[in-house]
Amino acid sequence: MKLMRKIDLKNSETRHLVILLVITLITFTAVLALPVRLIEPDDNTYYVAMKAFAEGKLTLTRSEYLQFQKEVKDIGTYHFGVQYVRISFDKFALEKAPAYPFILALFHKLGLERAVNLILGLLALIVFYKFLSLAYGPRTAFFSSLILLFNATFLGMFYRIYMSDFASMVFVLIGVALYYMALERDKQAIAVLSGLSLGTSVAIRYTNVVTTLQSCSMRSGS
């Protein structure tokens, strides 16, 4: 209650942001009510990598690899493949970028892996809203954020917690938004956060390096 008293709802930007967050939480709760499914090999892979990393296993022995394959199969997935590659006779390593499994593993230790995309989604929408509010005003930022929230791809990948797509998109979105906010406000601290976000996005998905390089080239050209 004390927090609500401190929030100035008479301020248009604050009022629109509060309404956006309420709508977002309701929407995310509805999506999270659906049971988890491992739909594709990528889902299997991140699920296995999450559990392995949480146990401190950066590589798997053959027996561990086969045991994880059996576990995935027992869950009832349509695909039983796990995208680990053999690096020696008895060692298998994840073939994907490592950052997202590490994030999942951290939350898995707390039993909160399903909260990963919820937290990232909230953070992305807040930063996106603040960026557009600065550029175009609160009303435009509010409706643009709603369009992003209810985008089918956004919600679809939000549900797929054992895929890196949502987290990859979120860190790119946050990084680019913070980058332009830093330019607008001429604040180095925001620029540093932008670099960290874009760097994380590359560690989640290597192809995001294209976005990072484009941002750097635009900065050098400005």
Image (tube, rainbow, N blue to C red):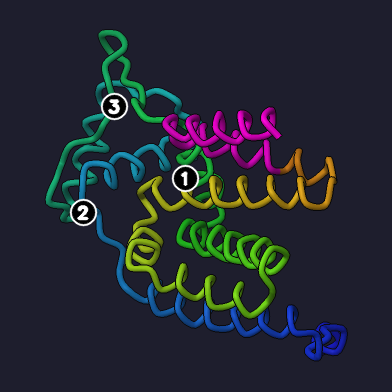
User: Residue drawn at (69%, 69%), measured in percent from left and top?
Assistant: 133
Is 31 left, or right, of 54 in this rendering? left
Residue 216 in the magenta stretch? The answer is yes
Viewer can see residue 55:
no
Q: Residues within 10 Å of mark 3 (few under 14, many from 20)?
A: some
Q: Residues within 10 Å of mark 1 (few under 14, many from 20)?
A: many
Viewer can see residue 60:
yes
User: Residue drawn at (84%, 46%), measured in percent from left and top?
Assistant: 186
What residue did someone put label 3 on? 84
Residue range of the region highlighted in magenta in the rendering: 194-222
Marks 2 and 1, the one that precedes in the sequence: 2
When asked about the image quadrant of residue 155, the answer is bottom left
Residue 70 against residue 36 in the figure, above or below: above
Q: Main secondary structure of the magenta part?
A: helix
Report the front residue among 173 and 30: 173
Element marked by disc 1: helix
Give the quadrant of the N terminus: bottom right
> Where in the figure is residue 85, as x and y percent of width and height?
27, 21
Element marked by disc 3: strand
Report the front residue among 53 and 149: 149
Report the front residue among 50 and 140: 140
Marks 3 and 2, the one that precedes in the sequence: 2
Is 208 left, or right, of 197 in this rendering? left
Question: Which label lies toward us, 2 or 1?
Answer: 1
Is 136 left, or right, of 165 in this rendering? right
Q: Residues within 10 Å of mark 2 (few under 14, many from 20)?
A: some
What residue did someone put label 2 on? 39
What residue did someone put label 1 on? 168
Question: Which label lies toward us, 3 or 1?
Answer: 1
Residue 120 against residue 31 in the figure, above or below: above
Dot 3 amino acid type:
Tyr
